[in-house]
Amino acid sequence: MSKVEVGPNEPLEKALRRFKKKIEREGILKALKARKHYEKPSEIKRRKARSSKNRKRF
């Protein structure tokens, strides 16, 4: 669970921006989007192979 402490004179928008950055860094949104729909095991293997191939290219 990610938490962000809001300072006494800090605007809520600034704290919300920090929270969003923290969530992005931890990879929570990426995991949530991945679990949104069922993915067959063969599709998982194919996706991982593609990403591996892209990483090796650079």
Image (spheres, helix red, strand yellow):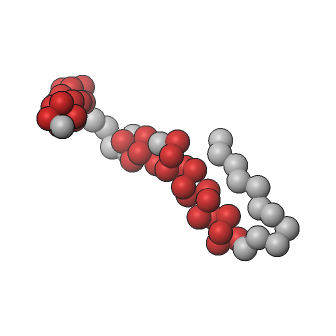
- Which residue is at a point 18% across and 37% down the rendered structure image? 58
Residue 40: horizontal and vertical position, in percent?
24, 30
- 41 up-or-down from 57: above or below: above
Query: Camera-side residue: 41 or 22?
Result: 22
Q: Could you tell me residue 37's position as x and y percent?
A: 33, 43
Task: Give the left or right position of residue 45, taking residue 32 as reference.
Answer: left
Total labels: the figure holds: 0
Q: Is residue 12 above or below residue 28?
A: below
> Can residue 11 be seen at all in this image of the molecule?
yes
Percent coordinates x, y for residue 3 in the rendering: 70, 49
> Farthest front residue?
58
| Residue 47, x across and y down, in percent | 21, 34
Identify the residue at horizontal 21%, vertical 26% (top origin). Answer: 45
- Quarter holding the N terminus? top right
**Does 8 appear above or below 35?**
below
- Residue at point 36%, 42% (across, down): 34
Residue depicted at 65% across the width and 45% down the height: 2
- Front-most of 6 and 45? 6
Q: Is residue 13 above or below residue 26?
A: below
- Front residue of 55 and 47: 55
Viewer can see residue 40: no
